[in-house]
Amino acid sequence: MKPNRTQKLWMYEQMHTSRYFEECIEKIYMEGKSPAFNMANGPIPGEMHLSNGQEPCAVGVCAHLEAGDVVTSTHRPHHVAIAKGVDLDGMTAEIFGKKTGLSGGRGGHMHIFDADVNFSCSGIIAEGMGPAVGAALSRQLQKKAGVAVAFLGEGAANQGAFHESLNLAAVWKLPVIFVIEDNAWGISVAKSTSTAIEHNDARAAAYGIPGHYIPGNDPLAIFEVAGEAIDRARRGEGPSLIEIETYRLAGHFMGDAEGYRPDGEKEALFARDPIPKMRQHLIDTESWTEEQDQELVQRSHERVDLAIQFARDSEYPAPEEAMEKVFA
Ligand SMILES: Cc1ncc(C[n+]2csc(CCOP(=O)(O)OP(=O)(O)O)c2C)c(N)n1
């Protein structure tokens, strides 16, 4: 099923929102971190993993999801959270460690939880797969509508949790979709040195479930394949595995010198930036005008600017609250 105009514009706007959000976070993250780079300093403490370049994976999949569907994401979660409809003010405040954050400022950027739209993520790689399988099982047992989607990186596909989750989901025919964002690098480790096969969709056969590989970091192709897999899960026909070729335009984390990248890789990736490509597609197929484009971009930027202002203006939690809401 191909996306209609409304769905294309929704995907394009979420991609812009996510990209601009990360451009702002990138700048703010560096505040207070010089002359000596200390992760603890500045308005955004801790590690920061940007997802710019990977927006197509998030929008192509989440375009098919409702608030009641479950999504688990990774340590690189912003694009997926935005596409799933996570509260942007609460997410931004969480990244800033503020009291108004979705987890009261305790989780930071790798631990965004929004129960209203059933979104969670984790700094432990492949960790979201078990909870996604559990959410799918609860929907099956309670005969409730809804699917679960677990996003993971290609590095995480070599974790034990990956294989255990696929097996259980396949045996019990659970309504869950596993989406691997293959950005070619697990920190500085190339996929070719960590994984014996070229594409992880081949692993689906070992569990008797459909596997799909989507080249080109193309939101339209992702929309089509994800739509089929999600419909299949909604019909009660069980899980699917999708691997998407995508690109991380930034380092693994902020502060990464990226010395492992071959010469010219970064330039080549920027030349294939999916956002201008989507814009050109809209011009070619949807009579998209410059004026409409500016309006959409401005709207997405205003939304982000407001969320950042909200986060900056919010209070930090009081030190005496540190032991509240934690297991002690
Ligand atoms: C269980 C576990 N082992 C190791 C790490 C350290 N670690 C953080 S990110 C990462 C690489 C992840 O690569 P990938 O899954 O491809 O995701 P990407 O960073 O490319 O988005 C590793 C090994 C971790 N967070 N969790």
Image (tube, helix red, strand yellow):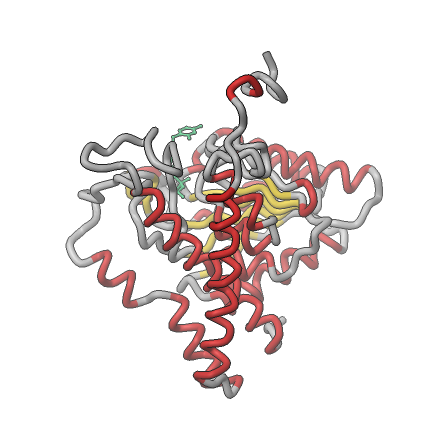
Between 74 and 311, the one nearer to me in the picture: 311
Residue sitting at x 70%, y 42%: 174
Q: Nearer the viewer, residue 115 or 65?
A: 115
Quarter of the image holding residue 165?
Answer: top right
Examine the rendered structure and indicate whether residue 183 appears above or below residue 3: above
| Location of residue 275 (image quadrant) | bottom left
Q: Position of residue 10 (x, y in %)?
A: 57, 68
Looking at the image, residue 295 sits to the left or right of residue 251; the answer is right
Task: Establish if 310 lies above or below 156.
Answer: below
At 39% across and 73% down in the image, what residue appears? 277
Residue 126 in the image: state x and y as whole percent: 50, 35
Q: Position of residue 112 (x, y in %)?
A: 55, 39
Q: Who's the residue at 63% across and 34% down the image?
A: 131
Task: State the residue at coordinates (44%, 43%).
Answer: 76
> Is any atom of residue 213 visible in this view?
no
Residue 110 appears in view: yes
Q: Relative to the observer, which residue lies in front, 187 or 328?
A: 328
Q: Is residue 234 left or right of residue 144?
A: left
